[in-house]
Amino acid sequence: MKVTAKDVAARAGTSVSAVSRAFRPNASLADGLRERILRVAAETGYITPTQRMAVQSRTKTISLVVGDVLNPFYPSILEEFSGVALRDDILLIVHVIPKGESVDSVMTHVFDLRPMAVVVTSATLSSELAVQCQQKGIPVVLFNRVQINTALSAVCCDNYAGAQQVADLLLSKGYQRIAFVGGVPNTSTHLERWRGFKDRMNQSGKFIFKSASGQFDYDVSLGVVHDLLADRHRPDAIFCANDIMAMAAIDAAKAAGMRIPCDLAVVGFDDVPMAAWQSYRLTTVRQRIRLMVEDTFTLVSQLVDDPVACGTIRMTPGVLIERDSA
């Protein structure tokens, strides 16, 4: 007969809800009670629903760890991942990182599921967690970012070359005071877009007029651009390291009575669906999400077949999409 949480609770002298919390490391529960429940569970052979699902579907399960789901770029990614997973008969389990938390907060659940691979996007996977995944025989692929740890495989857009395309566009149109609004400073997406933009500007004998950090956040960027435009020596063009910040720049400019692009040109990066809306008509660099997702599944398959073949980075060129904002 299958042992239930109610059976464990009865033997441990506690409630069913306490049994459930005992298997969640971050849940509030006295250490002594947690130890007693886990001991009883081990003695009785109790298997949690999460562990049971892992046993049933382990062979074709991928855990997708995501954060920043308010950014419309990531729902687009989820849609593509879901479509390819359904086509390939793979169970895709999505783990959303709560705002303000790190990827560590969901990895215990990932390990319980024992998926055939883990795909991490929109969050930095620590080296320690990467080692844990490798020790457990779970391949890891970073999506839309890379990490210095060369043992990690990744699929990403060529952010460096994409930013160079933006610099070429703005310089070809004669803009002189070109500013850069970046994202979270320690992320590869910010660093590569900043580096590509700066290098191309310098190669052309120009320098970035001003730079600021918008943290990949609409509200933060709105304030940052407001300050840039309030200065007597304000920019005549702004490259924002993602579309959300570029939309904030357009809104800040319009609030200041400026016309886009006559008074200020704005360029973004990602090409989220909102970028094509009539109120923005944003010039941006499109990430080829479908191709990147396909590459991710191919890479996962290769890593499952050959676990030692890690450290592979697949880079996809971005496409400059010219609309009305520049």
Image (cartoon, rainbow, N blue to C red):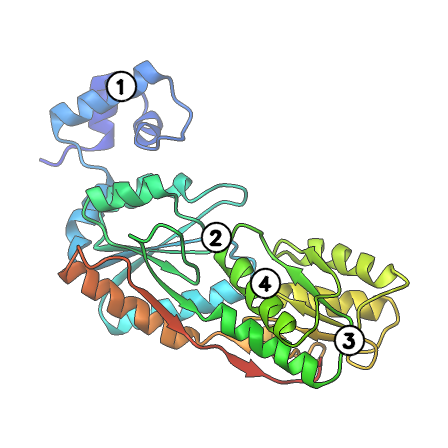
Q: Earlier in the sequence, mark 4 or mark 1?
A: 1
* Tag shown at residue 194: 4
Amino acid, disc 3: Gln
Above or below, comparing residue 304 to residue 128 in the picture: below
Q: Earlier in the sequence, mark 1 or mark 3?
A: 1
- Identify the residue at image location x=55%, y=68%: 196
Q: Earlier in the sequence, mark 4 or mark 2?
A: 2
Disc 3/disc 2 C-alpha distance (Å): 37 Å
Amino acid, disc 4: Trp
Which residue extends farthest left? 1
Amino acid, disc 2: Gly
* Tag shown at residue 176: 3
Amino acid, disc 1: Glu
* Left or right of 159 on screen, residue 174: right
- Identify the residue at image location x=58%, y=83%: 321
Residue 281 appears in view: no
Q: Mark 3: few, some, or many residues within 10 Å (few <14, many ≥20)?
A: some
- Identify the residue at image location x=23%, y=20%: 10
Give the number of the mark in front: 3 or 2: 3
* Residue behind mark 1: 35
Q: Residue 30: x percent and y percent?
A: 37, 17
5 or 235: which is nearer to us?
235
Disc 4/disc 2 C-alpha distance (Å): 22 Å
Mark 4 and mark 2 in contact? Answer it, CB < 8 Å.
no
* Tag shown at residue 67: 2
39 or 105: which is nearer to us?
105
- Identify the residue at image location x=56%, y=61%: 71
Q: Earlier in the sequence, mark 4 or mark 3?
A: 3
Above or below, comparing residue 67 to residue 246 in the picture: above
